[in-house]
Image: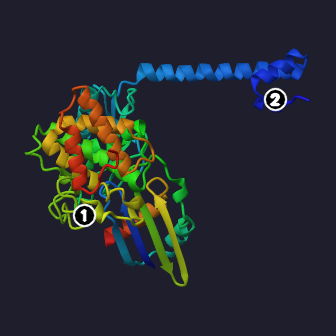
Amino acid sequence: MCSTKCFIIPPHILEELAKRGNSSCKKTLNDTARITQRRQTALNNLLQREYLESKGDRFIYDCKNTYQQRVELVIEEGGDLVNDKTANEAYETSGFVRDYFKNTFGLNSIDGNGLDIISNIHYGQNYNNAYWDGNEMTYGDGDGKEFTDFASAIDVVAHELAHGVTQFLSNLEYQSQPGALNEHFSDVFGTVIKQKYLNQTVEEADWLIGDSVVTEEFPGVAIRSMKAPGTANEFDSQPDHMDNYYDGMADNQGVHINSGIPNKAFYLSCMELGLDDCALIWFQTLKALWRTANFNDMLETILATAQNLTEEGKVSESSVEVLSKSFSAVGLISVVV
Amino acid sequence: MWYRIEISGGFSGIPKIYEGSADIEKEQLEKIIPYLEDNTKESNPNLRDGQQYSFQIEEGTQRHSANFTEKSLPTELRQLLEQLTHSA
């Protein structure tokens, strides 16, 4: 006897039963078709609306020092700047990051599909952090003692926005080595975009992450150093070699710690290949990686990516050799001959 | 009341530990105790650079501890955190 349970029966079976005269199955078949059609229409409308409306527009929300996001919209794309330095800088820097990805790699906003770029500023009270929550970015003002104004720092904004890019390109999970790679890619694009923003060469750049969000009282010059991991501040425990790999449980098994290892490899590569070649190789590698990729997967993928880009004449012919040398210098040696 | 609050993770990855004793109104304490239940399961899987909050509180013979993510930390505990860290 066919009842409403027929919803879980495949349509071709329902159809066969209906053909044999089962009226309840026929009704179920029709109902199912209507529901499917209604869902399809709703989905199409949703996709069409997103396609038509999403242009990677920027929206800056003031959280008014509460722990709520989107409290008050203060700037939207094309709108006037306001009497708030942080809001204006968040608008400018998020636009610079968006344009870098678009103009350099053809990536249309964070998701490649014109996702709106939403920034929440003045989050919480004395809040010493910035984060990406899967949809939007949120920045604290800092406590003024050790940290200050996360939303105004180009490398912090690029770092957080790059977490969004990673989410949509490879979705590296946020623990252990895939998590450290997730952090690494954010630092990579944080530092690349900072150098572009400041119009610096790789020799001129300081290779520091978060140098402008620490105060003079902070016991260090920045949060991290890609040139010399482990030296940015008194608490900096980043290793620059696999010999010192952190295998503890803190920080999601060291996502902000072990990222120092590929960070150093990136720095060494840039000093020989230049920023643009490395940025392209790293971006294409990010697209090729997957959720559970580890350091060795990263190495094999980046070498294959560099080889392809070399054959296409898009990067230096010495790329594979330089990358092999750079990763070897941090204790990551390719096993593929 | 004795407390130990550890904030870890975040963009900086630098852990902060606040530990000490504080005089908390009985009324406020009664309000926050029910929130001291582990709430890490409410974590947003796409959260990146979010902080983790670990609370340990002792009052008399009672001990309470709980862990929270950026998104699951109740307002009452945020207020307590602000209150304690400002006085630290």
Q: Pick whichever, A290 or A325, lies toward us.
A: A325
Q: Secondary structure at mark 2?
A: helix
Q: Chain of mark 1?
A: A
The outermost residue toward the bottom is B61
Identify the residue at image location x=31%, y=35%: A305
Q: What residue type is disc 2 on?
A: Cys
Residue A318 is left or right of residue A259, and the answer is left
Q: Pick whichever, A315 or B66, lies toward us.
A: A315
Residue A6 is left or right of residue B82, and the answer is right
Q: Which residue is mark 2?
A: A6
Q: Pick whichever, A96 or A310, lies toward us.
A: A310
In the displayed structure, A196 sits above or below B28; it is above
The outermost residue toward the front is A337
Q: Check the picture and name the quadrant holding the C terminus of chain A.
A: top left
Q: Position of residue A287 (x, y in %)?
A: 37, 35
Residue A188 in which image quadrant: top left
Q: Which residue is mark 1?
A: A236
**Separation of marks 2 and 1 at Cα, in angstroms:** 61 Å
Q: Secondary structure at mark 1?
A: loop
